[in-house]
Amino acid sequence: MSAKKKIKNLFNFFGLEIKKKDKEIVNLSFDEIYKIKIKQNPVIFDVGANQGQSIERFKKIFAEPTIHAFEPIKDEYDKLLKKYSNQQNIILNNYAIGETIGEQNLFVTALTGNSSFNKLNTNTKWLKTRSSQANTTMENYTKAQEKVKVITLDNYCREKNINGIDLLKIDTQGFEDKVLAGCNQILKNNIISAIESEIMLDNVYDKYLNFSDLEKYLIPNNFRLVGLNTVNNNLFSGIVFFADILYFNKNKFKL
């Protein structure tokens, strides 16, 4: 028996199967797609900037990005100011993006990246895990309610005279549909070229989203789903079920 056959039998014994990799199947990260498809001096809107994770990410991908960052939590915004106030290509804004202009209570969590306008469901495995990571109790994981200013991207772009957004990134813990609802005019006017959004499909918050909640704003305005990155592929295992999704404007890209 050949060595190749012996190895194959060994893998079969353990319930594994050896298959040739299909050369036509290539898994590109979103960042790799951006390097191919988006210019090196893009205008980027970072909605839900938190502690600057995406700012750092975009700075690594692009040579000269101009980033408009939006972070409603005052403490996190102040940290961003200390870090980026001397960088003219990073414009920091201390408010949330939504469907209408006004004020709204934000539920601020111990790990602030989980803060949301939606309440956390109690007694979930997710909440137990995150509370442990933050060295707090499940009852105290939501540590405060902070009244924050909310504006729309339609109004922001009108006031700032912005006529082109190469990439809109949205990470707002179940508020992504409201962000898009406040983009009505700039979506219709082809201001945005690409949209990267998180979509919460699990029961972490008292509200979850379906693709239709986002696509009702995107499909009529010539956007097409071009990328998908899931965390878990089902609702019934693990503690999270969400995805990062990428849409391109068909009027801006040859698809």
Image: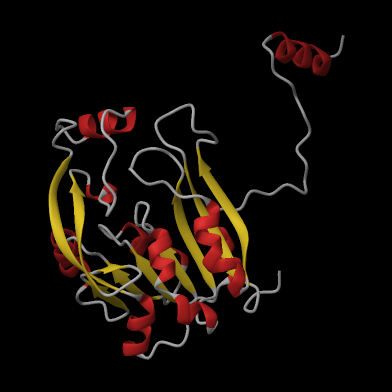
Provide residue 130's location: percent of width, then percent of height: 26, 34
Question: Image check: 32 left or right of 241?
Answer: right
Residue 42 shows in the view: no
Q: What colour scheme governs how the chains and residues are painted in the rendered image of this protein?
A: secondary structure
Q: Outermost residue toward the bottom?
A: 161
Is 24 displayed left or right of 218 in the figure?
right
Q: Quadrant of the N terminus?
A: top right
Residue 115 vs 128, above or below: the answer is: below
- Establish if 10 lies above or below 249: above
Q: Quadrant of residue 110?
A: top left
**What residue is drawn where x is 29% and y is 50%?**
118
Identify the residue at image location x=24%, y=73%. 93
Residue 46 visible somewhere in the drawing? yes
Query: Residue shown at 55%/64% (left/top)?
Result: 216
Q: For the point 61% across and 53% down, which residue is it? A: 28
Residue 43 percent across, percent down from the top left? 43, 78
The quadrant of the picture occupied by the C terminus is bottom right
Occupied quadrant, residue 176: bottom left
Q: Position of residue 239 (x, y in %)?
A: 39, 31
Q: Is residue 55 above or below residue 160?
A: above
